[in-house]
Amino acid sequence: MLYEDDIIHKASLIIIELSYLETLPNIQLLVCTKCEYALFPHSAVIHSSTHGIILSKKDKPSLQSIIDNRNFAKKSEDVPSPTYPCAPIDGLKQSNGFACILCTYCCVTEKTMSTHISINHKGSNAKDKSKSIIDQALFGQHPKYFAVVPSLVGSKKNNLFAIYLQQYAPYIDSLQLHNPPLDANEVPPLLKIMQWHEHLKPYTGDRMKVQQLMELTSLPTSSRGESWMGEPLRLTIEGYIKDASHKGNNSPLGIKCLLMECPRVTQTGEHWRILPDNSIGAYSRLLHQWTHAIMVTIEGHVSGYQFPLTDQDMIHASDLKDALQANPDQLHIDLFHIFIKPLLYPKDHSTIPGPYTKWNEVFECFYALSCLREDGNFQPAGLVTQMFAKMKYFIRGTVLYEGLKVSTGDHYAAVECEALINFRPGATSPMNGTIDYQRFASSIAMNTSSPPATRVSSCGMFITYKDKTLDVSKWRSGLRKRADEVTKEIDDLCLHQTFDLHIPDDIFDDWGNDIRGYSWTKNNNLPAYKRCLLAAMLETPKLKLGRLNYAGEFKFDIASLWEFIHKCDSINEKLALLCFFTAGQTPRVSEFIEHKYANSTKPRTIFMDRDGIWFVIRRGKIENIIEKETFLPIKCYPELSRMIQIYLLLIRPVEAEFVKILQDDMHYHVYKEYLWTKGCKRVTPEQMRLSILKFNTNYCDVAAGTQEYRQICVQMGRTFLGSEFEINEHDIDALATQAGHTIAMSRLRYALEFGKLPSMSSDLLLRFGRVSEAWWEHAGFKPNCAPILPLHVRQKLRDTAPLVLHSGEKDLVHSPIIDTQTIIVTVTSAVIAEVQKMQTNLDTQIRKAVAEAL
């Protein structure tokens, strides 16, 4: 027996008795101590060699003989899993996993659990239908996981706690009741007006009922739901909204004003602002969900919910359904208009029996369902205002569509007639109701103090937003590393040559020039750098860019061109991240990726000044609302400005010409205007967001996406810079007041500076520049400055360090003042910065050593 144990030990194996099976003889498992999973007997000998274990010629047959003579489990189907609750089986790997609460299925990843629930429990949500557990599996191949309770290790067979877990705990854990509010004080202000909780009270008593109700707005997927209510219905709805929007774009301003106010009482009112096509997809999803909810309830739904539809509404829904099922590849825009119009128009309540209730309106039911959450509560005021805005857009589009459809020639009168039905003050209509609701919800949202979601450590170097914590020292170190990487890549791509690149201090860039194609890179005072890199590359044989064919024609090597493009993509991505993170407060990604260095339909957003490169956001989120072009500048630190200059003057011309060779004229012109590109195309918001997430994950050890980082970024500004850099353009300017006009008029009409935009005078530009310079210092990129300490630390250091006068002079008037406060803050910042670098480098080295050891 000792001999057998010794052989098994040599193979790094152990034997586990499955006593819970209560069979004679006991079934055993042959377990690898390295993998911590059971092996199939026929593969045990070979498996040992995968871990570098070398058995002698004598040991191999001995081991196989031992295996053949034991009662080892030969396949996973022969061994049932232990019944919950049970203690972990010693020797098998324990993992953090998930258990389905609707069956006994267990797994180790959320994705696997989501797949299981979507296939086996259709309509259920994986997050609510699973729970976190500790699990094990007997075999590593095709593992079948089961839940274990570590606290039961060493317990006896009839352990009372184990019996309790088996007989009582499942019932208690399965309780999912949603208690209604006990009194009016528990009802939020928005719900007191909307009464959604009262309307849906019969359907929200427990979690299961809520899930069934939320299935109404759960859109079909490839494995769930009716296919005709998925893509065919989505495309039809998008087509309908796009058609209405295009009709709006082609309508005179007067008709668009009717859609905002009817009857019109002034010629100076607002007009309907049309969505761009790329935003319609997000808007149409809400209308898709509502239509889906109506369709699935017409023939009865497990939730029991019904919309207050008329017989005519049912006919319209049936016609749309038949058309989508018969011809799913066509857009049934007219049929959808016929279906949706009565639901978005006022209803004749005289034909509805019984007392009046607002729940006879379909749109009221829409709102209640759309705002229901998985926990049985409803969305707060701040998250419902956009729903109301979308609803108003749908109604205006439907009114315009109907007006133009029934028009006999006087389109204005036809649209006005339809608008009066919906927009007339005092009318009980979905539009007027939505306007009232949005006004009330906005008022609550703007006057509600939300609980803090961002926290700052006492030292100020760790900033947390929800569950994401950014270590500022790692963030600084990561940015420095990324800057060093891109510097090397640029140097390598330029063949370690500078090409005598020099930009004079007096280089002129006319910021106000909006002529198509104008850019500071085309300034006549700059030497011709356009193809100097290409010339050097063609003279470098090892690059193998191309060759002469038999006819004496030069042919590029396509693979080499693509290799160059991919290297440019890497540099471009790193420059984009450095600009995004270090030049100032982060802009919205959708605005950031639109940066262009040459004018086109819209003016450029990258400018040159004698002290560096400026990036300007000229299309803000609220641009269409305020009908005013925004201008928000940030300045790049000198090192980054230099890298961008090299990239635009040396690399981009070659890159653009290679794109022309590989693609076509359209892609070439993209590279001649836009800065952020990848793979011969403009960078998309999704690609930029992924780059930000990867940087934060790989360089800062925090998986923070754009949304989390922007919150953290704002908090960093408050923590390190405070309010001393806030810019308020509406403050009274004494000089402008003395001249008898406002500061805005002063900048727009008086002493316009040559080469500058009217709205961006030198004084305001300098203030924005100081903000950017302060951010450089925070990020660790301000030349000859250590990264600044958190504001409260700097203030504490100043408070403890009084000013000291030079004592060598009797005449204090002429005696120089030694600013000990500044000296102490500067020295402390430098010392702490070096210590943090050492800590970060040490942490990296430790991780590397551990990884190599494993």
Image (cartoon, helix red, strand yellow):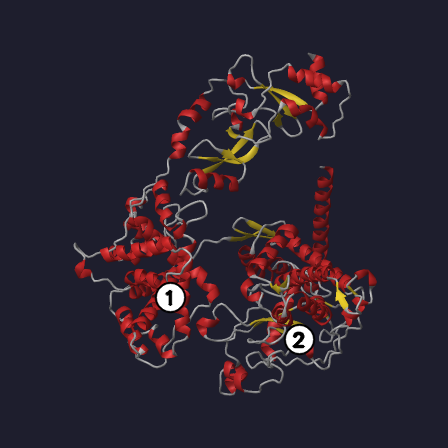
User: Can residue 367 be seen in this snapshot?
Assistant: no
Q: CA distance from mark 2 to mark 1?
A: 41 Å
260 or 324: nearer the viewer? 324
| Residue 460 occupies quadrant | bottom right
Q: Amino acid at mark 1?
A: Tyr
* Residue 393, label in figure: 1
Binning the other alpha carbons within 10 Å of mark 2 as few (below 14), some (14 to 19) or many (20 upward) gives many
Residue at horizontal 54 percent and vertical 64 percent from the top: 590
CA neighbours of label 1 inside 10 A, class few (<14), some (14 to 19), many (20+): many
Q: Nearer the viewer, residue 446 or 484?
A: 484
Residue 190 position within the rendered picture, expressed as x and y whole percent measured from the top left: 33, 56
CB under 8 Å between callouts 2 and 1?
no
Image coords of residue 453 (percent x, y)? 49, 53
Q: Nearer the viewer, residue 15 or 799?
A: 15
Q: Residue at x 57, y 68 (%)?
A: 594
Residue 209 visible from this viewpoint: yes
User: Between disc 2 and disc 1, whose residue precedes?
Assistant: 1
Position of 633 with respect to 119 (left or right) is: right
The picture quadrant where one finds residue 348 is bottom left
Q: Nearer the viewer, mark 2 or mark 1?
A: 1
Q: Is residue 507 above or below residue 708?
A: below
The quadrant in which the N terminus is found is top right
Question: Which mark is drawn over residue 783?
Answer: none
Q: Is residue 298 left or right of residue 34?
A: left
Residue type at tag 2: Met
Reading the image, the residue beneath label 2 is 608
Residue at image position (49%, 67%) is: 621
